[in-house]
Image (cartoon, rainbow, N blue to C red):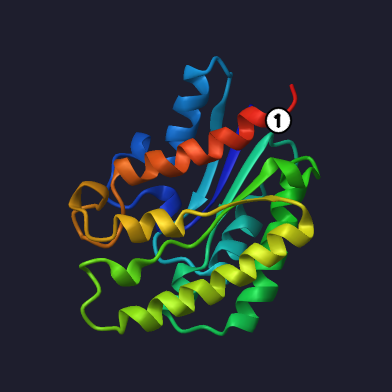
Amino acid sequence: MKYLALGDSYTIGELVPLNQNFPNQVVSLLQEKGKDCRLDKLIAVTGWTTDELAIAIEKERPAFDYDIVTLLIGVNNQYREKSQEEYRWQFYTLLCQAILFANGNPKHVLVLSIPDWGLTPFNTSRDAQLTSAQIDAFNAINQSITFDLGSNYIDVTNSSREHATDKNFLAEDLLHYSANEYTIWAKKVIEIILSWKA
C-alpha cells in the first residue's frame, strides 16, 4: 500500500523522531499486521494553514494512485484567527484533492480532527475555554465536509484533551505531542484501514 500524508506539525511530528510521527507509526503497525505499506510522500510543515498546504500540494504534485491518504489541517487557521468560512472552502478543496490522490476513492481518505492545543501547559496567553470552543467549531466544519464527501473521520481531539497536561503524551515544548499520543492516533487509523476489503 502506498501512503500519502498531508498536514502540519501534527503530521510531521514536531519534536519527535521522524519514525515516531503518526504516519510512520501507521506504516509500522500495518507492517506488523503483515501488510506491505510504505509512506511514499509526507507533505507537512509546522505552522501551515490550509492555504499553505494547498500551495505545497500544487508544487509537489502528488500522483493519483495512493491507497491511503490522511489529512489533518486547521489548527493554525484557528491559531492565526483566520475565518471559519475561509477554512470551510479551503478544507473542502483539500479534501477533494485528497480523494483524487486516492484513486478517486473517498473511503481511502482518512481525516483526523484538530487536536486541542489550548488545554496544554504551553497555552498561558489565551482563554482555554474559548480556544476549545473555536477548535470545536473548526472540527464541526471538517467533520461535516468529510461526511458529505464520503471519507473517514477520526476524532483525536478527545484524546488530546484527555492527555493535555500529561507530559508522557507531550513533546518537550508542552504544546505538540509525543510518540505516545501519536500511537493512539495511528491505531485509530489502522483500525479503519484493516476493515477495508482486500
The x and y percentages for residue 93 are 72, 65
Position of the C terminus by quadrant: top right
Element class at badge 1: loop
Question: How many numbered marks are there?
Answer: 1
Position of the N terminus by quadrant: top right
Where residue 141 sits, quadrant-wise, is bottom right
Which one is in front, 79 or 180?
A: 180
Q: Residues within 10 Å of mark 1 (few under 14, many from 20)?
A: few
Say whether residue 155 is visible. Answer: yes
Looking at the picture, does residue 37 appear above or below residue 142? above
Which one is in front, 147 or 51?
A: 147
- Which residue is situated farthest in the top direction here? 34
Q: Amino acid at mark 1?
A: Trp
The x and y percentages for residue 140 are 60, 70
Side of 189 where 92 appears, left or right = right
Q: Residue tagged by mark 1?
A: 196
Looking at the picture, does residue 11 appear above or below residue 1? below
Name the residue located 38 percent from the left edge and 38 percent from the top edge.
Answer: 183
Side of 144 where 5 appears, left or right = left
Name the residue located 66 percent from the left edge and 75 percent from the top edge.
Answer: 88
Which one is in front, 36 or 60?
A: 36
Say whether residue 63 is visible. Answer: no
Where residue 24 sits, quadrant-wise, is top left
The x and y percentages for residue 44 are 48, 54
Name the residue located 33 percent from the left edge and 57 percent from the top edge.
Answer: 162
Name the residue located 74 percent from the left edge and 43 percent from the top edge.
Answer: 107
Side of 29 where 91 appears, left or right = right
Looking at the picture, does residue 33 appear above or below residue 180? above
The x and y percentages for residue 60 are 61, 51
